[in-house]
Image (cartoon, rainbow, N blue to C red):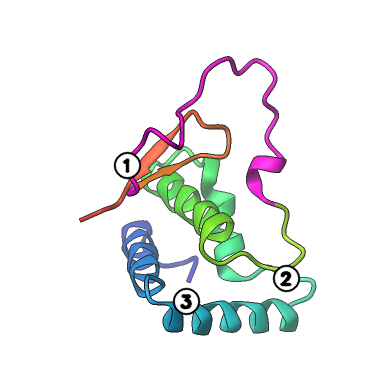
Amino acid sequence: TKDSRPPVILFSLVALEKFAQTSENKTLILKYLEAQQGKKKTRKIPLEILEGWRYNDDSVKRQVGFCSQWTLDNLFVLPNRQYSHEKVDMDGINVMLNSHDVSEYLKLSPNGLEGLCNYA
């Protein structure tokens, strides 16, 4: 939950990503998230709430927000959710990380200026 300690949430997100490496688990998790989204038409699911931490001053909360956003954009794509890279203002950005030149374990931000690796 949002009241849990940020490091616990971060490690839980990494574990969720690992569980999603098999298609069966990924399908089960996605179905659960879609069901939760359907039940909470006016409220957000937990990953969407945690995505709000993306620009928090606390570095661990910021990592939680980054991982939540990346997970929603790349692993558990929900219906009617706009991809983060479609919402980013790219004016003033002249250089970015190239997704073709990086490790498969590196998560890139929607604007291409940040990367995070949780691989262990």
* Residue at disc 3, secondary structure: helix
The residues tagged by marks 3 and 2 sit, at their Cα atoms, a distance apart of 23 Å
Sequence-first disc among 3 and 2: 3
State which region is magenta.
Answer: 83-105
Mark 1, other Cα within 10 Å: few <14 / some 14–19 / many ≥20: few
Question: Magenta stretch mostly in which secondary structure?
Answer: loop
Residue indicated by mark 2: 43
In which image quadrant can residue 55 be found? top right
**Which residue lies at the image location 46% right of the left edge and 30% below the top edge?**
98
- Identify the disc placed on residue 32: none
- On the image, the x and y values in percent for residue 95 come to 52, 18
Measuring 44% from the left and 78% from the top, which residue is drawn there? 23
Which amino acid is tagged 1? Ser
* Picture coordinates of residue 5, whole percent (x, y): 36, 62
Q: Which residue is mark 3?
A: 26
| Label 3–label 2 contact, CB within 8 A | no
The residue closer to the viewer here, 1 or 36, is 36
Left or right of residue 84, residue 61 in this image: left
Circle nearer the viewer, 1 or 2: 1
Dot 1 corresponds to which residue? 103
- Residue 87 to residue 120: above or below: above
Looking at the image, which residue is at 37% across and 47% down? 60
Q: Is residue 113 left or right of residue 115?
A: right
